[in-house]
Image (spheres, rainbow, N blue to C red):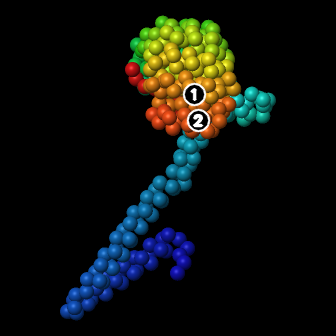
Amino acid sequence: KRFQTADEFLQALSRQGNEAVSTAATETSAGSKFDYKFVAIAAGLVLVLIAGVVVSVFLKSDFSPDSKSDFKSEKTAAEKVLQPTIPLDQQKNAPPSTVPAAKRTDLNRYDRDVSKAIFMQRIDSSSLIINASGFDLRDEDLKNLRQDARLQAIVISDTGITDSGLAILAELKNLLCISANRTKISDAGIAKLTGMPKLHTLHLSETRLTDACTGSLARIVNLREVDLCDTTVSDKGIDKLARLKQMKSIHVNRTLVTDRGIEAIVKNFPALEELHARSNPGITAKSLKYLGNAHSLRRLTLSGCPISATEMRNFFARHPQIKEVASVQEKMFLDFIAP
């Protein structure tokens, strides 16, 4: 039989359960041979009935019209704040009017008041990490960060933060990590970070940085992970980082780094564990010879470089301790490691 509603189904189960229990009780009281089969069936039906009632009550209480309304409003609010960013490289050739306002990486992406309110809420929570990626934040908002705070990492990617904002962050001496991808920072802003004694991770992709910033990076004495993807950093810039012997991870996807830069990376960074150099036309199979001497290297990305699949397979076969990172969702922006 097909039931129109869940209540009809539960009522039918109830009737069957009552009939089975009644039959078993009658036979037992009449002195008939005790049959465990009927008792088992009755018990099973009763359990199903109880479970059905519990589920029915749960559904009615949690998805009542009022609850649905609350859930919908919360979902809408969450989507407004957490809407994914459209990568900058997908917006470069598109007129601003063709990119939905709620998804742009400019200052119109989020409502200004909402961004400030959420940011202040996260500051007040005394979190170790504050993620403000995509918020409509300005440099002056960072002044609300307390210098004596426990804050260790901050993500300000896709915001309106500039060099002035980096100068404010430089006063936070406990900061370990800054992620400022797709912001308006420049080489001058990086120079303001040189006095941060604990800073060890910088993510600076898709910014206006050039080789001039690497001299400042080299003065951040504990720096051991840097992301310079989609900048104009070249082999000359890599040379300036030579003093950072503790460097463990470097990202130079889609930069001007060539085979010579890879040679310098291997030579200058003996502790290097991770290298990402995707889609660099100047990196060829010649770099594989240098990378074979990177004894600490464990993760490598060279996809999109003019190196054949056979050459790559042979390299990884000779060096099984090195794992190829083929996924675009590799360890990147929020993998902050305490010193």
Are there few (<14), some (14-19), or many (20+) residues within 10 Å of tag 1? many
**At x 60% / y 35%, what residue is drawn?**
311
**At x 51% / y 51%, what residue is drawn?**
67
Q: Quadrant of residue 206?
A: top right
Residue assigned mark 1: 288
Q: Quadrant of residue 304?
A: top right
What secondary structure is found at the residue carrying circle 2? Answer: helix
> CA separation, marks 2 and 1?
8 Å
Q: Tag 1: residue type?
A: Leu
In the rendered view, tell whether residue 48 sits above or below residue 29.
Answer: above
Residue nearest the viewer, comparing 153 with 323: 323
Q: Tag 2: residue type?
A: Met
What secondary structure is found at the residue carrying circle 1? Answer: helix
In the rendered view, tell whether residue 175 sits above or below residue 280.
Answer: above
Are there few (<14), some (14-19), or many (20+) residues within 10 Å of tag 2? some
Residue 276 is situated, as x and y percent measured from the top left of the image, at 57, 27
Is residue 194 left or right of 207 when viewed as pictured?
left
Residue nearest the viewer, comparing 115 with 153: 153
**At x 36% / y 84%, what residue is drawn?**
19
Residue 267 is situated, as x and y percent measured from the top left of the image, at 51, 16
**Which mark sits nearer the N-terminus, 2 or 1?**
1
Residue 92 is situated, as x and y percent measured from the top left of the image, at 74, 28
Q: Are marks 2 and 1 in contact (CB under 8 Å)?
A: yes
Residue assigned mark 2: 312
In the picture, which quadrant includes the C terminus? top left
> Is residue 161 shown to the viewer in this render?
no
